Image (cartoon, rainbow, N blue to C red):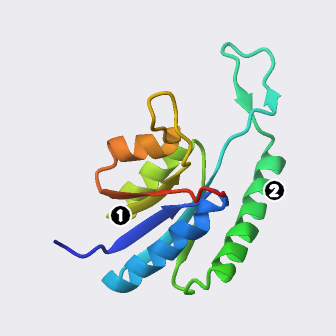
């Protein structure tokens, strides 16, 4: 089996993020691979454009810029709390989580994604968030799915 070269951890700043990062650090050390954290700033529906042919919902550019700035600070704080190497890439994407993650995977040569899902069970006894589920179903690289701690 070929060693992983570049590991991606999509983070949402929930309690499970720390577990994902710890596992990612272990694997990156084991395989001597690159490690990247990615947070996706979603386009939030705050204002509507009037008089358009197709109604569209956008976010004001100033608010979007503030969200990105706040995310940069949160990522830096998380990296410090988790004692991440300065070589760890702290990345921000804007858009829909699944689309942004898959685009990052493709353009950056990711060969392992470490993602999490809640431990809550759905109607059929197992439920994963829609982003995690889409990643597992469609990723062209390996995916490690970690359960959230029961107290998270």
Secondary structure under tag 2 reads helix
- For the question of whether residue 32 can be seen, the reply is no
Q: To which quarter of the image does residue 70 belong?
A: bottom right
Mark sitting earlier along the chain (2/1): 2
Give whichever of 107, 111 is nearer the camera.
111
The residue to which callout 2 is attached is 66
Secondary structure under tag 1 reads strand
Mark 1: few/some/many CA within 10 Å (<14, 14-19, 20+): many
Q: Is residue 81 left or right of residue 85?
A: right
Q: Residue at x 34, y 41 (%)?
A: 137
Q: Residue at x 45, y 35 (%)?
A: 125
Q: Is residue 146 left or right of residue 83?
A: left
Determine contact: label 2, label 1, CB under 8 Å.
no
Q: To which quarter of the image does residue 150 belong?
A: bottom right
Q: Residue at x 45, y 73 (%)?
A: 24
Residue 49 drawn above or below residue 43: above
Residue 85 at x, y percent in the picture: 55, 86
Residue 91 at x, y percent in the picture: 57, 66
The residue to which callout 1 is attached is 112
Mark 2: few/some/many CA within 10 Å (<14, 14-19, 20+): few
- For the question of whether residue 38 can be seen, the reply is yes
């Amino acid at each position: 089996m070929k060693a992983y070269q570049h590991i991606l951890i999509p983070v949402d700043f929930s309690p499970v993020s720390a577990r994902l990062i710890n596992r990612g650090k272990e694997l990156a050390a084991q395989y001597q691979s690159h490690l990247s954290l990615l947070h996706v700033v979603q386009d939030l529906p705050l204002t509507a454009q009037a008089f358009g042919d197709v109604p569209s919902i956008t976010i004001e550019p100033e608010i979007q810029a503030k969200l990105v700035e706040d995310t940069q600070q949160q990522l830096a704080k998380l990296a410090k709390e988790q004692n991440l190497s300065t070589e760890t890439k702290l990345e921000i994407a804007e858009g829909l989580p699944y689309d942004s993650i898959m685009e990052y995977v493709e353009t950056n040569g990711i060969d392992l994604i470490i993602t999490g899902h809640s431990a809550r069970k759905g109607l059929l006894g197992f439920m994963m968030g829609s982003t995690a589920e889409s990643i597992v179903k469609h990723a062209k690289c390996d995916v490690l799915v970690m359960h959230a701690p029961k107290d998270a």
